[in-house]
Image (cartoon, grey):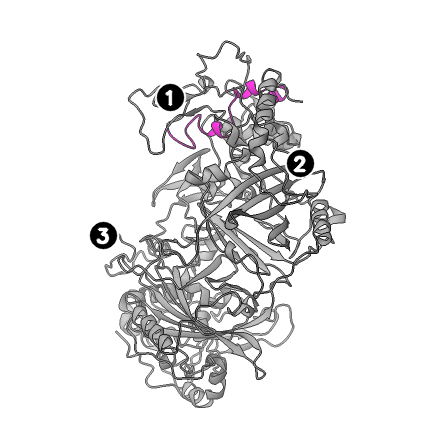
Amino acid sequence: MMKKRAITSLVVAGLLTAAPAAAQKMPDIGFESVGRGRPLAASVLDMEQEVGPNWIRQFGAQPGNDPKNPFPLNGHRHDALPRDYKPLPRDLFNSPDFYADKELWSDPRYFRCNSPQATEYQRGVLARPGVNTSDSDADGPWGHCEIDMPREAIVSPYGFKTAQEHYEALKAETTKRGGPDVYTFENFPAVEWNGVYQRPNGAGAQNQINWYWGRHLQIPTVLSVLTPKYQQWFVQEAYHQVRGHAMWPSTFCWPEGFMRRWYPAAVWEHYVIATPDLVHVRAGVARNFIQDIYVGREFNMEDVANGGVPRLGAAVPRWYGETIGFWDDDVLITWTSNIQGWKSHAQFEFSNKMQSIEIYTPIRENGKFIGLNHEAILYDEEALVEPVRIVRNLHKINDYKDENQVPYAFIECVQTIFSVNGVNTPLTPGSKIEYEMPDMYGRPWAKVWEEHFEQGMSKPDTNENLFNFE
Amino acid sequence: MATNSKNLGLPLAAAAAIALGLPAAAQQSPQIDFKSVGRGAPVMVDAAELPVLGATYQGGPRGPGNQGAQGERVFIGSAPPGQTPPGIEPLPRDMFTSDDFYKDRELWSDKRYWRCNSTVAIEDAWTARGAIGDNGPKTMGWGRCDSDYPREAIVSPYPFKTAQEHYAALLAETKKRGGPTQHTYATVPGEWTGRYGRGFGETWYQARKMQVSTMMSLLTPKYQQYLAQETYHQGNTNVAHWQSQYCWPEGFMRRWHAAAVRDHFITVTPQQVQIMTGVARNFITNVLVGREFKMDGAVPRLGQDVPRWYGETIGFWDNDTLITWTSNVIGWKVHAAFEFSNKMQTIEIYSPNRDATGKFVGLNHEAIFYDEDALVEPIRIVRNFTKSGDLTEDDPYVYIECIQTIFPVNGKATPLTPGATFEHEVLDMFGRPWGYLWQKYYEQNMERPEEDDIFSFE
């Protein structure tokens, strides 16, 4: 149970006022579906302010002369809190052992009302300078406790317990509607999908920003959708990030992992190739994200009864899963499974059980195709206490034939940053370090934290390993 | 140097292959019903018709392609380890006895310096199928000296000096033929979309049937030295540095190397054709149809003036043939073959192969390589992809994220388990890191000539 008593009323008010605008965020699909197109309960676009704390700055703006106040702060210094903010005696910033504070994790004040993303602002791991300008981690500033995204707007509005149920319901619905549609190159309705879609940052933010970016919600709200083990892992990352010890996969040229597809800093433009049998979606910055949707295919379900997952190929999880789909007119309904569990920084980790139902729906203005609504419902019985939903709108900016269309730069990451005594350290050629070979399937990020920064903590001996083979 | 390889004339086996190989070669060449200025020239010699040079072993309990079998282990080559082939006078000093291959430059063009081995046989030398012998490297066996893939069949049969000239000529030819064809979804050859099997026919580039000296003859002096360096270390010091070992990028030219790719997944639309393949790393080719390169950078390009690992590709349709030009490639290496520079550009032509009934069965892929830094003249590789299925069946493409488990420890590739520690030196990835490792650990007493850095920014 969350302890956000003080801010609940404000959230409810926000929820009520947000409803009409929220309805605009989803395309009008023309009927009430069992499992797609449901309006958002609330949209971050209707929230005037981010939770913070963060510097209020324009892109490219240089810091002012005062190193303690380089920009105006969206949030509150720890020594200048609003009168109704009641700090906890022990919180994430001053605790020597976050494991021992489990009972406090559901209170936003434990995190000083920081948003998930703000944990990366504290020490400047996401953008310098850090909002904590003190030498002491315990001086970390606060975000706005009165701002939050309602949990109701995060969890799936559909009643399905599994991705399989969801997919089958959508397929049954489509069958009733006369589908699924089987297309050839001669009658393919998604020709206009081919092209390049806006990157999420910059101008694209107004179409793609959502709760998963972690700017508009409190950490306990995220924790409320997680199972205890994944709550612990989330807090573990937050604890170390506010101390400047970020362990981002892309820092080390590790795979980004499935969920980073939805994170704005991990993807830029999306490149879509559409054919009747295969739709290919590619994006990336530090690593490539490739989703191949095999239309008309069926998953092999033989492992499911024994705890396995639906799959197309071998019973080996894939970094970005395997995806099947079908057409309902010009809407593409997909199911992704067989995903490699991994992490997403400033967001929750996920397991090999992660599966998604993703629906790509054309957005039209006066009948003209302008982009795709991308609705994703994420199922992970190990990480999530109930399914969650992320919705974004990908606006098309180029055809492949446009002269100003820049081809996708396929990324091969060349590692220049290494973990040296637990600290991310950029190294130049010729530098020498003692390198410890990480166990890539044993939460290598956590190994670094635990070895270097958690001595003396009371880590529960769960003896569980997300990737163990037992 | 050195287009004048000391493989005087065509070896008998190769000459015979040219004569006998025409029917097979005709099958390997694209099906084209007119004489083009720059595509569809017959393949002179079908590599499949030539013998493996060796020296290597086939069969037997640990033999290639026969692991676990109890069959006879058969030596392939002209002299097993420790012996000398009859009729061949060994050089007093060769790559297996030399303590400094740099000093032996004058010998590189003599196939005996390599004991008539192919680059692949040398790469295999220290493996279970290798012929290194009991006192390697001195006892390394000899490959066949009487066979070779002829240089004439490797170099481009077209007269163009640059990829730009070549592409322009093909575009002009296509215009004369009423093209380029502007396809829609209704007319684009959508039947190309699908999966193409692993086998794409043997080519000379698989390097099992070609003398090292013939490969040398294709290269400029600097790139000859690079090839000699790798060949020496693979066969003599037994220190290979393959990029995929370390999860480094495979690099553009590995697309043509049989071990680097498996099934090819092709997706066709009127505006773009995509080809994905890979084993240790992904190779993605996106052919942007109808686009034109900017010509104001270091090389022709579409995006920024920054080379890309797999380049950028434009193309056009001549009816159901796709003609492409790739540029803006990052120079890199291919093991058991030659390195290449940022100047590498290709003209690649994809032509449909049809059976006697006219049914589409696959694609002929003809590639002509231009690299003024690495190659003394353009070269060509022709292969055939056989369509094995649609994308509606069988396993999907597995997008590869390489997890490094092998590291260069004291200059040698070493598999490590989680928790193992070692002194790791950060390498300059744009300064031939493989060359750096060899030089630092295994060339201390050699007299390496001064050279420019191909990746230097000066």
For this rendering, which residue is in front, B82 or B37?
B37
Chain at numbered mark 1: A
Location of mark 3 (residue): B458
Sort mark 2 into few (<14), some (14-19) or many (20+) by Cα contacts within 10 Å. many
Is residue B310 toward the left or the right of residue A333 in the image?
A: left
Label 1 to label 3: alpha-carbon separation? 43 Å
- Locate residue A21 relative to residue A80 in the image: left or right: right
Q: Which residue is mark 2?
A: A157
Residue that badge 1 annotates:
A72
Q: Residues under labels 3 and 2: Cα distance?
A: 59 Å
Picture quadrant of residue B89: bottom left
Q: Disc 3 residue type?
A: Glu
Residue B109 occupies quadrant: bottom left
Q: Residue at x 46, y 79 (%)?
A: B30
| Subunit bearing disc 2 | A
Residue at the spot 26% in from the left edge and 61% down from the top edge: B447
| Element under disc 3 | loop
Q: Which residues are magenta?
A: A101-128
Q: Position of residue A167 (x, y in %)?
A: 69, 48
Q: Nearer the viewer, mark 1 or mark 3?
A: 1
Q: Can see residue A457?
A: no
